[in-house]
Structures are given as structure tokens and as C-alpha cells.
Amino acid sequence: MDGVPVRPGRILTDVSRPAPAALTSWLEALECPHCHHPLRSRERTLHCPSGHSFDLARAGYVSLLTGAPATSGDDDAMARAREGFLATGAYAPLRAAIGDLAPHTAGRVLDIGGGTGYYLAGLLDELPQARGLGVDTSVRALRFAARAHQRAAAAAWDVFTRFPLADGAADLVLNVFAPRNPSEFARVLAPGGHLLVVRPTTDHLTELRDAVPGMVGLDPRKEERLHEALDPLFTTEEVREVRFPLAVSAAAARDLVAMTPSARHVAPETLEALPDGTVTVSVLVSLHRRR
């Protein structure tokens, strides 16, 4: 399906208790992170011919991390805050913009740094023929992501190393408020494939940043750095700003801070003192085609 190279012997399940269907739909594309051989599924384990194996968690995701456990990503409290805040629909206009801008011919969607799977699930609703794979290093976030959509699988791997995917395995890479690895994005995209990037502008949540000392600041050179990283590998096709005022309760404001890296720098008593209010949501959504 969707132009993914099928290699001899690459495939699917060989006993009666298969991996989740959403994950088996990606097995032709997944590779062992140690030796890059194809992966097969046996019961609740993915394994390669070299003997490396990766157990599926009870929640339905698979960890393809190698070496020491990842220390980045949302902790339990951050993931719960993210799930709770996004479930209110507060960022629905952003999810709608992603669905509107994404190419509707995409068959395989790779969501890098996808967190709880909120944006990937919304995109799959817009693309009924597509299969999704959400990647994150947070165990708690992956538990949410594995059940975010019936056509979305979830996996953990290090975004800053070679992805355990075959060349040209994806039609669309989604990257929402997440780390980027442009060379790997380009490698795993099929010819003519697209990258969709979402990032904040410098005045995103400015009212909240003014009210909460310790919130992580935004790089004023973010756009310049993004273009420097992407231009050798991608052509920018469209950039769209999504901007709107958002009324937030005190509880929603706490979740909005707690779901970001700022949570590690803000005192709990500061969050407890937040009032109801209105903040500015201001992000850029851009579509890039692989050169």
C-alpha cells in the first residue's frame, strides 16, 4: 500500500495472537533499530532475523528505543495535563487547519513527537484511507496515543538517530510542537512526500507567559533556524497562521502550562494562583515537499 517497498520475507504475523492491526499495517516498513533488518510479529513481540526482539506493551505500543531509556518527553503529569486540555477542544481550530493543509492523497502518516495522538487522530479522520504511526518517548503519552484512533499505531524511538523505518516508507510526516530531524524526515518520505510542521509564533500564549514567571521562552530566530534546516531538503509550498483568542478557566490554564516543558520550571503554587482569563493562540502551520 502507498508505495512502501516490500522486501522479500518482510511480514506479518506467524502465530495466533497478533499485534494490533494498526501496527501490523506498518510492519512492511518497520526495521530493527539495531541491524536495520525487517521486523516480523510473533504473539506480542516484534523480532528480526538477527535475534533482536521488542515486546509490545499491554497498552498496545512498541518501544524500539535502544541503549539507555529516554529521559526526554512528557512525564506522567505532563501527559495527563495534555490529554485533559486537548480533550476540551480548545485547540480544535489548529487540528482543523492541519487537516485542511495536509495532502489528502497521503496513505501513511508518520507523526514525530506526536504525544497523546490528538493531532494524528484528527488527521486520520480527514484521511479515511490513511494509516498513522505516532512516535514519542513518553510512556504515558504512548498509552494515550495507542488508543487515540483505530488506524493509529504507536511506537517509541529516538528522534535524533536513524528512524527504524525503510526509505520512502511514509507519504506525510507530521511534526507538531516537536523536535525535528530533517534528514531523516526526507529519507523516510516517499518521492513527492510532504512534511507538515506546526510551531508557535513569538506571541503564542503571551498573556500566560507574562503571568507565569519561569515559563520557557520562545526563540526569536525560530523561523530563520527552521528555514536553514529544511531548505536543503524541502520546498515550502504553503504557510498558514492560525491565530485566535482563547478563553481559559483557571484549571485549563494550569493544564496549558503543565503540558509543556515549562512545567519543569514553574513552582506549583504559581500554577494554583492562576485565574480565569483569555490567552492568544498564535501558531504557524507550513507544508513542505521533499525535494
Image (spheres, rainbow, N blue to C red):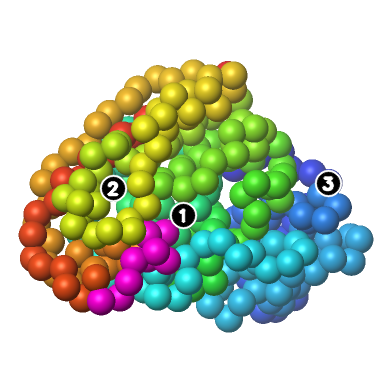
Q: Which label is found at residue 114?
A: 1
> In the image, residue 44 lies at what x, y percent?
69, 76
Q: Give me the residue at 53% from left, 66% from top.
A: 138
Which numbered disc, 1 or 3, marks the residue closer to the eye? 1
Residue annotated with mark 3: 8
Report if the CB atoms under discs 1 and 3 are less than 8 Å apart.
Answer: no
Looking at the image, is mark 2 or mark 1 earlier in the sequence?
2
Q: What's the residue type where badge 1 is placed? A: Gly
Determine the residue positioned at 33% across, 34% down. Answer: 285
The amino acid type found where label 2 is placed reads Arg
Q: Residues within 10 Å of mark 2 (few under 14, many from 20)?
A: some
Looking at the picture, how far across and down is residue 36, in whole percent? 81, 49
Q: Label 2, on which residue?
A: 95
Q: Nearer the viewer, residue 106 or 69?
A: 69
Q: Nearer the viewer, residue 282 or 270?
A: 270
Magenta range: 260-269
Magenta-drawn stretch, dominant element (helix, strand or loop): helix
Name the foreground residue: 287 vs 14. Answer: 287
The first of marks 1 and 3 along the sequence is: 3
Residue 180, compared with residue 89, is above or below; it is: above
Q: Position of residue 24 (x, y in %)?
A: 63, 61
